[in-house]
Image (cartoon, rainbow, N blue to C red):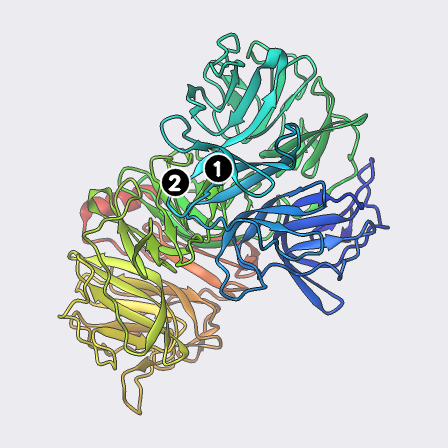
Amino acid sequence: MTVNGSGYTGIVRVNATGNVDTSFAPPAFSGEIRAVVRRSDDKFLVGGDFSVLAGGSTYRDLALLSASGALDNSFWSAFAGQGIINALAVQSDDQVLCGGVGLQLAQVATDPTRHLIRVQANGFADGDYPVFNGPRAYVTGLAVDSAEPSYPNRLTVAGAFNSGTTTQINWRTTLTNAGAVITNEADGASNDGPILAVLSAANSKSYVVGNFTKAFGLSSNRVLRRNSNGTIDATFNIGAGPNGDVTGALRLDDDSLILVGAFTSFGGTACNRIVHLLSNGAVDTSFAVGSGANAPILAIRNLASVGIALTGGFTTFNGQTRGGLAVISSGGTLLGTFANFNPSGNASGTVTVNDLATQPDGKILIGGNFNWFGGVWSPKLARLTRDGAVDTTFSAGLGPDGVVHDVALRSDGLVFAAGDLVGAATRPLGGLARFTAAGAVDTAFTPIVTRNDNSPAPVYAVLPLAGNQVLIGGHVRKIAGQERSPLARLNTDGGLDAAFTPQITITSGTSLSTYALAESSGKYYVGGYVTYEGLSRGFFTRVTGAGAIDTTFLPTTPSAGVVIPNGTVREIGVQSDGKSVICGDFGEIIDGSWSRPQRRGLARFATTGALDPFESTTGATSLTYVDSLSLEPNGQILFAGGFTKYNDVNRARLARATATGALDAGFDPDGGVTARARVIRRVGLTRGVIGGDFTTYDGAASSGLAAFILDPQPSANPGANMLLLLLN
């Protein structure tokens, strides 16, 4: 990131004016820092999803810095780099609790992944601490206290915590110094969402804050006040409460409460991401935050003699520039503290669009790796109007925690997002989430998709089906503890459909991951990655509605019923004549012969599985991968990826092939895009859209997404033609 004109990586220290303290000189971090805590010796522990190299040592996810920022090489590198640390808490003896998801220790190669680990002051993991390895866990907060003498170094865990091996999670847990459970607030009838904070209030009462509709058996929208006897305090009346997620709270001396988060109104009163509630629960309309923050506030903290500090994704506060850090008075007035801190890249950072889907009304859903799109906070998932503007009626709030690789639309308007997702709205995810038509997380959908070690599995492909079921693929190994690899079919609540058991077996093949799914006539086409004879290869097959390999799909192959290209299959399209087209990183088809058929980036197969004549033998060259394809109504094929030529003709990462596979010379994108394209679709009668890592299209600035002109190709469905006409 760039701060006040100078480049920094990962962490900076600023003075009260917001200028960078240049005496603090940390090493260059690659990745994301999510938590910082200070030890008793004034050294700093940093945790997150990163690697950092200094003095010949590589530290992953956890590192110790001196007071001047130097990496402490005497601190052991405990973690293997799998997983994410979301929270840290230091005990009185300088041992540190690390909470997150999918954490694996470097000390033992076969060590199970965990979501809570204690690390000793020297950096070695505490081997006596319990192994917390249950599925569906996502720790978001940790706090250590010794308020009760009988429980020194008592730990409070916020988020989804699993203290066992079943799928039962707890939204708030307290543990002894030895890791034994003191209390659990289990997910169920009494608690239906994360409990982020319990704050002491006057008269032995307590404020309970989180993303729930019920906590401790008490019904309320995300915030309530609890009497000392455990009943709800009816004198604290919040009305309808916030319209979005809460991330933190601060109690003031007068027993009032400041809430922050992703909400934009409270009880019908506009309040962008911050609100002050009086001690009776009413909104304090005199709270002088004005227009508030233009993006979520993620944390709030009282800084003694300075003010109330707010941190988050925002770039302005009450109309004034504030780069994710602002200080206000207890009355809400924006103060000048840290005013000079102005990191660039927040709202104008790199955008990668990995997938898109068109709604019946012409709006376009996009998913990828971005926090802002078109100047609007749109973390990893956004909806655009037909002219490309961000549709602000769709808001994913805090958004998915992880990169979105695939998006899909259900017939009733619900939205699926899949990828390297571990959480959303402070809730756990296993690679997959479902959102309402307005962008809120659909809490009725709770899939538990994991690897064999119970860590969340990446989901790379999602295909909505009839009956509100959904087919998913990725590095899938288990659904709620039941083995399913490399794909599964889920019911509408996210539970496993036991009637579908995938039976894709590949001779000499291991480590299957699904990247592409398609459906036709009740059968499923599946493609992806496989380690074949010890080498990285791809696979493509067709399975029945029950999951068995379709015995009528008979390609020429060394493994019955499965095509094996020499690279990953990225996407699948099924033509109206039943032929299937695949694209990917491959250059040939492994058929068991000494003279393998050449198919560079694109290949087509008959309904029988036989390789179809297709003129892609010199295909997509100069980086052969083709990431995406879109079947045209007249049998032509739009495709995009990393190539710069197709059949020896210059085409900068997008092109169109005729029905025979020859280059369509009539489609010429001229300069094309400057970096890898990851998705391409026709979205109207005369319009196409391409997404990827690029920053320009044919020389014009276009960050991650661009539209281009196509010739009209009416569909065989007159109703669809009318719709396409209206969209254009």
- The one nearer the camera, 619 or 10, is 10
x, y percent for residue 379: 52, 43
Outermost residue toward the top? 235
Badge 2: residue crowd in 10 Å (few <14, some 14–19, many ≥20): some
The residue at which mark 2 appears reads as 168
Which is in the foreground here, disc 2 or disc 1?
Answer: 2
- The one nearer the camera, 695 or 181, is 181
Return the disc, 2 or 1, that comes first in the chain's sequence: 2
Badge 1: residue crowd in 10 Å (few <14, some 14–19, many ≥20): many
Residue drawn where x is 72% and y is 21% of the image: 333
Type of residue at label 2?
A: Gln
Judged from the image, the secondary structure of the residue bearing numbered disc 1 is loop
Q: Are marks 2 and 1 in contact (CB under 8 Å)?
A: no
Type of residue at label 1?
A: Ala
Judged from the image, the secondary structure of the residue bearing numbered disc 2 is loop
The residue at which mark 1 appears reads as 425
Label 2, label 1: how many angstroms apart (C-alpha)? 19 Å
